[in-house]
Image (spheres, grey):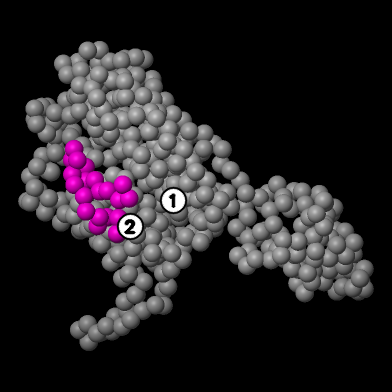
């Protein structure tokens, strides 16, 4: 069998057409290397080619093995974990819908949001995530537009309305800003500099670095301006995680760059805290009373006292014992950021424990997935969006058990909120899209070829379908 026939047979077994060209080129190069060795040993070219092909093994068998490896994959484990989290969200919505206090939530609305989220997620999952990278600046502009929409504060949460839908703008902008940031760091060029004179010394300033820093700071300032400090901290944490891992992977001047970055961040945080203490003693008191609610049980520590009371009287299974302020009539029933403690009070420690285990397993799965992605842009999308899920989840849980600052952070997939739920679904769809292509990116070609044509070197091979 000659090279042409061998590659034709192999590619016929590979069902995902986008990788056929790359695999053909890889196999052809390997066969030609073996062929060259035979020729150097004195063998005629035709005989050398036949021996090289024969040495590769059976073409059909190779094609079937390559088909199993290099094809789109669906991460069923992550989907199962997400489905469990969604199930908890439906459970919480059902309990709040039929509680004694009239709460504006509905199981029917939740089901509709789930269906919308699934439809949008399927579309994102099928699309090639790599095409997002070239639109990073547009995504940033869209995020900024969303953040600047006029709105009002409802129960302490800044809400805006767009196309007839009300939502907190920060929850939509968070993943969009992060996706744009990841695109910016992949557009970074070391030699894109301009020179400035400073004390008779010429300094090189990188234009891309200035762009990344400026746009990142603007996004964080917008979070603060609409008084969503918690979301600003979450976004900053995600930026920091992505930037740290990127610097470590780049290796060049790693320690120096990390020292400068963390030194600058530490300085900004100190100044921010000092300014917060001076300009708003309420925020400082809120931090203190989050960990010590007994110091102001009727004021800033009120919610913390409710949480402690539920934790003390919670059962393994079932509703907590009667409290001085019944759970159904407390703020914990209304505010979405107290979903976890509400679940403990209504269902018991066992159900809440299962939720925590699910979140931990989901986090571990996200980390391992990101670690195993070879294509770098996709890897950092997984790292960034995964870090948003992890930071939001554990910040909410810690806050609900008096181990974190009382703030407006929600539990992904579990806290009620149509737009918030859909945004979480779409973020996970991007992660699943990256995972889908983890074994085909190395061979996938962007340029389109006729469906039945494989380009191998100078030849075009027509694939005969079975």
Give the residue at x 33% y 22%: 95
Q: From the image, tell me which residue sits under label 1.
A: 383
Q: Residue furthest bottom?
A: 200
Give the residue at x 38% y 28%: 107
Sequence order check: which comes first, mark 2 or mark 1? 2
Give the image location of residue 20, x and y in percent.
Answer: 71, 59
Q: Residue furthest front?
A: 164
Q: Nearer the viewer, mark 2 or mark 1?
A: 2
Q: Is residue 453 something one can see in this rendering?
A: yes
Crowding at dot 2, Cα within 10 Å, few <14 / some 14-19 / many 20+, comes out as many
Left or right: 18 as drawn, with respect to 269: right
Give SS at disc 2: helix
Give the residue at x 80% y 60%: 463
Is residue 161 within the magenta segment? yes
- Total marks placed: 2
Q: Report the span colored magenta.
A: 145-164
Q: From the image, tell me which residue sits under label 2.
A: 143
Q: Are marks 2 and 1 in contact (CB under 8 Å)?
A: no
Give the image location of residue 38, x and y in percent.
Answer: 87, 69
Of 374 and 110, nearer the camera is: 110
Of 329 and 1, nearer the camera is: 329
Of 358 and 145, nearer the camera is: 145
Give SS at disc 1: helix
């Amino acid at each position: 069998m000659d090279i042409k026939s061998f590659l034709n047979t192999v590619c016929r077994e590979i069902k995902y057409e986008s990788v056929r060209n790359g695999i053909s080129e890889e196999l052809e190069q390997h066969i030609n290397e073996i062929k060259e060795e035979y020729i150097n040993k004195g063998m005629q070219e035709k005989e050398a080619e036949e021996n090289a092909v024969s040495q590769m093994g059976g073409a059909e068998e190779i094609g079937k093995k390559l088909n199993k490896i290099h094809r789109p994959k669906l991460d069923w484990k992550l989907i199962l974990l997400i489905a469990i989290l969604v199930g908890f969200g439906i459970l919480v919505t059902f309990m709040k819908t039929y509680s004694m206090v009239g709460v504006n939530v509905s199981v029917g609305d939740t089901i509709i949001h789930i269906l919308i989220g699934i439809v949008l997620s399927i579309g994102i999952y099928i699309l090639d995530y790599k095409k997002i990278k070239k639109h990073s600046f547009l995504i940033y502009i869209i995020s900024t537009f969303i953040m600047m929409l006029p709105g009002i504060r409802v129960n302490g949460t800044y809400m805006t309305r767009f196309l007839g839908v009300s939502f907190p703008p920060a929850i939509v902008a968070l993943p969009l800003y992060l996706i744009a940031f990841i695109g910016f760091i992949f557009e970074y060029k070391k030699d894109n500099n301009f020179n400035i004179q400073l004390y008779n010394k010429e300094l090189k300033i990188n234009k891309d670095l200035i762009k990344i820093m400026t746009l990142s700071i603007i996004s964080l300032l917008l979070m603060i301006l609409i008084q969503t400090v918690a979301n600003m901290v979450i976004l900053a944490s995600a930026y920091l995680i992505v930037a740290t891992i990127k610097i470590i992977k780049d290796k060049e001047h790693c320690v120096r760059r990390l020292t400068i970055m963390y030194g600058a961040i530490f300085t900004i945080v100190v100044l921010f805290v000092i300014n917060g203490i001076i300009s708003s003693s309420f925020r400082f008191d809120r931090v203190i009373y989050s960990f010590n609610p007994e110091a102001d049980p009727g004021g800033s520590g009120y919610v913390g006292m409710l949480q402690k009371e539920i934790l003390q009287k919670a059962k393994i299974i079932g509703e907590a014992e009667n409290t001085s302020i019944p759970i159904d009539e407390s703020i914990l029933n209304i505010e979405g950021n107290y979903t976890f403690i509400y679940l403990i009070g209504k269902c018991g420690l066992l159900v809440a424990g299962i939720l925590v285990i699910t979140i931990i397993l989901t986090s571990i799965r996200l980390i391992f997935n990101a670690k195993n992605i070879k294509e770098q842009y996709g890897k950092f999308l997984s790292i960034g969006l995964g870090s948003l899920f992890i930071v939001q989840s554990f910040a909410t849980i810690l806050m609900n058990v008096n181990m974190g600052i009382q703030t407006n952070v929600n539990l992904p997939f579990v806290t009620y909120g149509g737009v918030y739920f859909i945004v979480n679904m779409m973020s996970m769809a991007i992660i699943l899209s990256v995972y889908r292509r983890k074994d085909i990116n190395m061979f996938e070609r962007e340029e389109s070829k006729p469906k039945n044509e494989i380009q191998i070197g100078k030849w075009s091979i027509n694939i005969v379908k079975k």
